Every structure is written in structure tokens, then in C-alpha cells.
Amino acid sequence: MTVSVAKIAIDLAAVLLLALGIKGLSKVRSARSANGLAALAMGLAVVGLLIQVQPPPVAWLWIAIGSAVGGFLGTLTARTVAMTAMPQTVALFNGCGGMSSLLVALGVALVPQGESLMAPVVEAVSIAISVLVGAITFSGSIVAMGKLQGWLSTPAWAQTRARHAVNIALAVAALIGLIATVVPIAGGAQADATAPIAALTLLVLASSLLGIGVTMPIGGADMPVVISLLNSYSGVAAAAAGFVVGSQLLIVAGAMVGAAGLILTKVMCDGMNRSLVSVLFGGALGGTAAASGGGGEYTNITSCSPEECALTLEAAERVVIVPGYGLAVAQAQHVLREVTNLLEQHGVAVDYAIHPVAGRMPGHMNVLLAEADVPYEQLKEMDVINPEFPATDVVLVLGANDVVNPQAKKDPTSPLYGMPVLDVQEATSVFVVKRGMSAGYSGIKNDLFELTNTSMVFGDAKAVLGTLLQELRELGVGKAAAKV
Amino acid sequence: MALNELLWVLLLGSLLGLELIGKVPPTLHTPLMSGANAISGITVLAALTLIARAGDRVPLLVLGAVSLGFALYNVVGGFLVTDRMLAMFSRRKPASSRSTKS
């Protein structure tokens, strides 16, 4: 009796802390402590469960092995992974959550039903759903990770309409597997029967392939939406696993993550002005772009040297920096900081324009710039900065590409059409620092580069900024102010 | 355990989740996704339950341990990496008061 009272108290505390954790994660000031609260809640939940089930000695050995390996690898990954690799890391972790639900469901399916905690039909349905969603989450997340890491590219079949037929066939196969898993048990098989192995195998295979088939065609800026959606699925898989083992805490936590993930997915879609349906079934970016083979040749490109760029910057009153993934990868944030410091001392107003999906994921650029000590008060969001471009003298685009492509507003046939972009072309002059004329992440030609007020400064972001810094110093920029 | 009770829990949990995420600043999209992701590793509970119920059936013990490993990888890695990201936002607080905005 006392044990169950303690268990209930611990569970309630855990749910409360989890809710506070999710709530706090959506505000800048409370986010870090909220993350700690959620971790504490998880620890409490584990303690509560161990008090309740009181595992026998042999179980402890396996618990120790599983915890040691998972915990060690998790710590190692979290400590060593680069901030630029964050999207694929989140995808990997997420996939592992899905795999865990899948394995638990398979395990319970192998336990004779005489020992079930739940009514056989409920258990069979829960197992089937847990396997289905868990497998989709795992295989989808691994594909997403592979694509973000650059290990996988969008294959040809994924760009054809045939992919819909393939995916529908896979979905039907998964559904057959699901029904074949549930029906024999619902139909009143003997109490000691286990779930049919063949049906479960079909279910696992079909849903794993479905996860691959759905994720494979998606690329470019749509990728983060998929990760967020898969994150939501992993919550659903956890809730389903909660039904399998009869844990209310698991159900409520899984449901919270599932619902919160869905909201976050919607927020992201709204931010990019794309609907979830077009992300999932359009497979637009990436796919179409690769098919059109880089999007045509450039004509009328003006290129210039860092010296010319420095002269223009010196004469400017207002400069806006557009940082992109290329800047972060080159670790050029620190040199950039020095350049902007000089300009500010010279009396130039400097701002950073942050596109919602700059980097590889919404908010990713903020994380990357935070790593380089750029104050986040200086980072201006797209809606704030866009009306200010006409009053801007110089825009410096550093390693960003798709987020400044005017095609998104002008060309309805462009795969980028409809995605909100930074209106940098409205400024008096635009400098684009880029290594070459290669296409951006989406593989689409950028009309910005051909505009008369745009100059290309070719070179690695870090090297160009280094030269720029030197030129500015030679021009005496910032010196006078520094002496005062 | 009664099914209707669990369905109530599912319904209320979903509503709670919908309610909790309102307006998220884009700055926090990545950390929030990563944090929610770590919470989905709550399947540790299911894995532990499976191990505890496995008795002396080794295949089940192994399945449970592997499942626990995957779940804990998600939980431990997820929380730590989220903390690493968020630490970078708070660290700059004192430094940023110095730099003036135009």
C-alpha cells in the first residue's frame, strides 16, 4: 500500500515537472532550467517505476548493461557533436526513441498473453500501433540524418510520381500486417498464444520501408519540418508503448510530446509559408532542383575584390549582415565580429538579419552565432529587418543562398516560390561572399547574383573577411573613434 | 488497468501538450525540438517494465536491454545536447550588455 502511494506521488510529481519543462522550453529566459526540470522528471519517473515493479536480481544485470551502454554513448555523442551537426543529431536521437518503442512492443508480443497486463485486444492493437509508428520514426529519422549528413542524396525514383504509388503500396502492406497482427487475437485465440510472427514481420518490414519511402523524396529547407514531425511521431510511439505496458505516465508524456511536436511542426511550416501537405507530398525543394540540373547558367555576374567591398563599407551608414550556414561552417563568426566592431566604431550602424531557417533548421543560426558570442539582441528577425532594406546602404551576404533568392517572391514556377526570403536586393548595394557559383542547399539558381547592384566576392568566408578586416584597418576605419 | 482510464489520460495529455506550446520564438526552435525529443525517450519506462517482466527468458531480457539502451541514448544525449545549446544563450548575457545596438 505504501509503495503504491509513493509511486503515485512520484508519478504525479514527474508529470507536473515534465509539463513545466515543456512550457519553460518555449521561453528564452527559462529554457535552460526547464530542460533540467524535464530531465529531473525523467529520473523521478524511473525511480517510481523501479519502486513499483521491484525487478528481480537477474533483471538488474540487464538493466545495468542497457543503461551503461545507452548512457555512455548518449553522453559521448552529446559532448562531441559539432553545433553545425545539430539537426542530424536530433534526428538520430529521435530515431532511437522510436526504435525503443518498437523493440518493447515486439518483446511484449513474445510474452504469452496469459501474463498480459491489458485485455488481449487492447494489447494487440497497442503493440501493432507501437510497432508501426516506432518503425516509421526510426527508419525515417535515419534517412533524415543521412541526408543532412550528406551521406544520402535524393535518388531518381524519389523524384518521379511513382513514389506515391510505392508509398501507398507500402502503407497498404503495413495495414495488412497490422490487421493480421490484431485479428487472430481479437478473434479469440487461446489465452496462451503469442502474436503471429509472420504478421508482425510483415508489419515491421512494411512500416520501416514506408518511413524510408516517405522521407527519401524530401530535401532542402523542408528537412527540418520532417524532423519535427518525426519527433511528434516518436511521442505517439511512446504513448502507444504506454498502452502496451499499461503505464499512465508513459501515455501522458508521449501524448504531450506528440501534441507539442505537432504544434512546433505547424509553427515551422507557417514560418516558411509552406503547408505540411506540400512538404510531405510535394517533395519540392531538393528533388525538383536536382532534376533541373543546377538551374541554368549565370550571365552578367559582377565580381569584385575585398578592397572594393571595404571601400563601399567605409562609406556606408547602415550595413546589414546576412549570415548563412557557410559562415558557420568556416568558423568565420569571430573574424566577422572584428569586422563589425571596426565598422561600429566608425559610426556605421550594423545589424544581423536572421532568416527563420538560416542554417539547417529553424533557430539553428541563432545557436551557431551564440557559439561565437554574437549578442542575440543584435540578431533581427526577418519580419523586422525586411522593411529596413530599402534604407540600407550595404548588405553583406555571407554563405547564405536560398534565403536571399528573389525567385521565391517573383517566379511562381520556382520550387522556392512562396518561401519568405530576406529582401536584400532592395538595398543600395549587395555583396555576396561565396566560394564559387555553385548552387545552394536547395540546388536552385539565385537571381540575386545577376542583379546590377549585386557584386560577388569569391572566396572562403573566413579568408575574405580576414582580407576585408585588413583593408578596413588600412583605410583607417574605426581608428579615429578608437583613439577618443 | 481499464482502457477507458488510459484513453482519458491520452486525451488529457494531448490537450496539455497542445496547450503548452504557444508562441515559440524562432531562436528556440532547435533547442525546443531537441528537448521534446529527449522527453520522447520516456520509453525507458516501457523498456524497464519489459525487463522486469521477462523472468528468466533470455530473449526478452536481451530485447529489453537493447530497447533500454536505445531509449537512454535518446534521453541522456538529448538532455545533454539541449543543455549545451542553451548554455550558449545564457553565457553571453553579461557580455551583450556592453555592445550597444544602433
Image: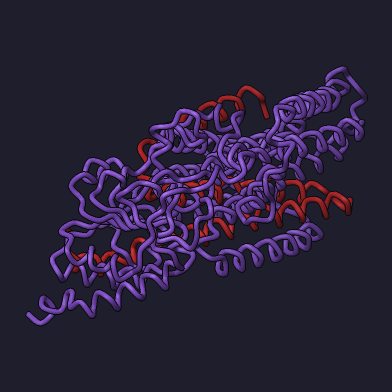
Chain colours: A purple, B red
Give left or right: position of A144 versus A20.
right
Nearer the observer, A81 or A213: A213
Residue A376's spot in the image, x, y percent?
30, 58
Residue A328's spot in the image, x, y percent?
45, 63
Is A56 drawn above or below residue A77 in the view shown?
above
Nearer the observer, A8 or A402: A402
Q: Residue at x 52, y 62 (%)?
A: B80
> Is any part of residue A212 visible from this angle?
yes
Give left or right: position of A477 versus A309.
left
Q: Residue furthest left?
A: A484
Image quadrant where one finds the N terminus of chain A: top right
Q: Residue furthest top?
A: A187
Is A311 drawn above or below residue A275 in the view shown?
below
> Is any part of residue A377 visible from this angle?
no
Q: Residue at x 62, y 22 (%)?
A: B4
Image quadrant where one finds the C terminus of chain A: bottom left
Residue B63's spot in the image, x, y percent?
81, 51
Nearer the observer, A196 or A171: A171
Q: Residue furthest bottom?
A: A483
Give left or right: position of B12 versus A118.
left
Q: Residue at x 43, y 64 (%)?
A: A458
Nearer the observer, B2 or A195: A195
Is A231 drawn above or below residue A148 in the view shown?
above
Residue B9's spot in the image, x, y percent?
56, 30
Q: Residue at x 48, y 51 (%)?
A: A38
